[in-house]
Amino acid sequence: MRYIDSGGDVWEDVTDGMVRVVVLGGAEVDHGEPSEMDHVEETWGPLVPIVDVAEAPEPPSDVLPTVSAVMDRASVFQSAHALVTGLTWDEGEQPSVYDVLSVAKWLEGAA
């Protein structure tokens, strides 16, 4: 098993309770001297196990919207925009995006 210390150096198990440094300051170390794990943790901070990618559980997948769902929402927005802009507005008034979104929300609820 491999571990990372508080400085970012990588250690690996040698025997029970003994580890050796394999990456020091970003450079690989070929012949690191074995040291007691307790001593390493006292000197360089706690050793956190590095999970192997092959052993790591798969992250939960985010459900992405489908094309048809996006297009359905786009058509609702277009319909709402057509309704709002087709209304008669006073001279000083103009439809805003909030008006369109409110109508779109109403249309989605009605569908």
Image: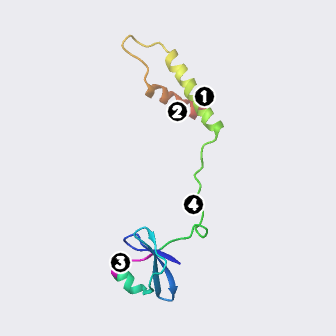
Instruction: Tell which tag, 1 or 3, sits nearer the viewer.
Output: 3
Q: Quadrant of residue 92?
A: top left
Q: Earlier in the sequence, mark 3 or mark 2?
A: 3
Residue 30: where, in percent of width, then height?
49, 77
Q: How far apart, in angstroms, are the residues tagged by discs 1 and 3?
A: 59 Å
Specify few, some or many for label 4: CA neighbours under 10 Å numbering under 14, 14-19, or 20 or more.
Answer: few
Q: Earlier in the sequence, mark 3 or mark 4?
A: 3
Q: Quadrant of residue 9?
A: bottom left
Q: Earlier in the sequence, mark 4 or mark 1?
A: 4
Answer above or below: position of 12 versus 106: below
Residue at (45% x, 86% y) in the render: 34
Say which element carries label 1: helix
Count of numbered tags? 4
Q: Quadrant of residue 4?
A: bottom left
Inspect the image, locate mark 3, and give the three-letter code of the amino acid beneath it: Trp
Q: Earlier in the sequence, mark 1 or mark 3?
A: 3
Say which element carries label 4: loop
Q: Which residue is mark 3?
A: 44
Q: How far apart, in angstroms, are the residues tagged by discs 3 and 4?
A: 31 Å
Q: Which residue is mark 1?
A: 75
Q: How far apart, in angstroms, are the residues tagged by discs 4 and 2?
A: 33 Å
Say which element carries label 2: helix
Residue 18: where, in percent of width, then height?
47, 87
Inspect the image, locate mark 1, and give the three-letter code of the amino acid beneath it: Ser
Specify few, some or many for label 3: CA neighbours under 10 Å numbering under 14, 14-19, or 20 or more.
Answer: some
Q: Which residue is mark 2?
A: 105
